[in-house]
Image (tube, helix red, strand yellow):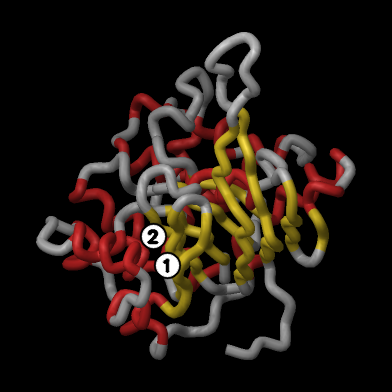
């Protein structure tokens, strides 16, 4: 597909190498190549799913895309700027445009902090009044009440905690949200609710998603495009419906075969992305969140 606009996020020949412990005092430290020459482009308003076996490099890709760690070689660009070349202050400002939702809604929220403090964390430079208004609006956007801001994480269910995590990611009105296994730690009955929320927020605010998941059904129903990873490399990429309908690589076929016959929460309760795409309204003005 030809595109005239530049990508929102672009990775250029990214590698990530980790050193392993030495087997002996005199031995050379071995290394592990978690990513090997990964390149991809994600355009505004789209959703890109990243799937692969455990250890394929999916979560490493998410951390590097978020500039939580640098690549060993290669370049990560957000809005055309190399994020790893930015001075600390500029990177901190740039982070308002890309936020992350982590896998575990229990571990990603500090139990000693109120919901208001958790959700407002990315707004440290704003005034108290601005933070309070933004927290109320973000909580209501994810289906919680403004009054929930005074509560603590232990007072909420797993699904509600993940909504709090999504509110924290939304509060800066980011253009990109990286979601690393956002529903895998939730009960099956709750997963579809959170996935529906992600789709609704994209339609409302035009947010772009990079979604990491081992669950092919989640990617199938939420993402427009998909890349398949194996041993730190992208082995297949394309439109989600086309890839899952006619997979070309053996790894993709194996992933699909492994999921056939398994109970899937998303498939029965989340509207198919391909069915929605033609009926989707234009995203509302992102400024409405604040």
Vertical placement of 112 versus 118: above or below? above
Vertical placement of 107 versus 27: above or below? below
Measured as percent of width and height from the top left, residue 208 is found at 56, 66
Measured as percent of width and height from the top left, residue 171 is found at 61, 49
Vertical placement of 168 versus 51: above or below? above
Q: Nearer the viewer, residue 81 or 199?
A: 81
Can you say which quadrant of the picture contains the C terminus? bottom right
Q: Is residue 130 visible?
A: no
Q: CA distance from mark 2 to mark 1?
A: 5 Å
Question: For mark 1, what is the residue?
Answer: 200
Can you say which quadrant of the picture contains the N terminus? bottom right
Residue lying at 61% horizontally and 34% vertically, measured from the top left: 18
Q: Is residue 54 visible?
A: yes
Measured as percent of width and height from the top left, residue 288 is found at 62, 65
Would you identify the image quadrant in which residue 272 lies?
A: bottom left
Question: For mark 2, what is the residue?
Answer: 197
């Amino acid at each position: 597909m030809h595109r005239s606009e530049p990508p929102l996020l672009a990775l250029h020949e990214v590698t990530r190498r980790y050193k392993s412990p030495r087997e002996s005092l005199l031995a050379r430290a071995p290394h592990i190549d978690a990513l090997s020459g990964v390149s991809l482009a994600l355009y505004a308003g789209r959703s890109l799913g990243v799937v692969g076996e455990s250890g394929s490099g999916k979560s490493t890709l998410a951390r590097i895309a978020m500039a939580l760690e640098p690549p060993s070689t290669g370049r990560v660009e957000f809005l055309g700027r190399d994020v790893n070349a930015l001075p600390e202050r500029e990177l901190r400002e740039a982070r308002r445009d890309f936020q992350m939702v982590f896998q575990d809604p229990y571990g990603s929220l500090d139990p000693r902090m109120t919901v208001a403090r958790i959700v407002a964390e990315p707004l440290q430079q704003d005034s108290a009044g601005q933070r309070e208004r933004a927290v109320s609006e973000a909580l209501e956007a994810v289906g919680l009440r403004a009054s929930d801001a005074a509560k603590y994480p232990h007072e909420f269910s797993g699904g509600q905690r993940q909504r709090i995590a999504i509110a924290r990611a939304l509060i800066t009105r980011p253009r990109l949200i990286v979601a690393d296994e956002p529903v895998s730690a939730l009960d099956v009955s709750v997963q579809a609710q959170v996935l529906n929320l992600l789709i609704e927020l994209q339609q409302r605010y035009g947010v772009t998603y990079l979604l990491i998941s081992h669950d092919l059904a989640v990617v199938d129903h939420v993402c427009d495009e998909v890349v398949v990873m194996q041993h730190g490399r992208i082995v297949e990429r394309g439109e989600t419906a086309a890839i899952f309908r006619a997979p070309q690589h053996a790894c993709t076929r194996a992933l699909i075969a492994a999921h056939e016959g398994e109970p899937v929460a998303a498939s029965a309760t989340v509207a198919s992305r391909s069915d929605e795409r033609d009926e989707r309204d234009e995203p509302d003005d992102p400024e409405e969140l604040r």
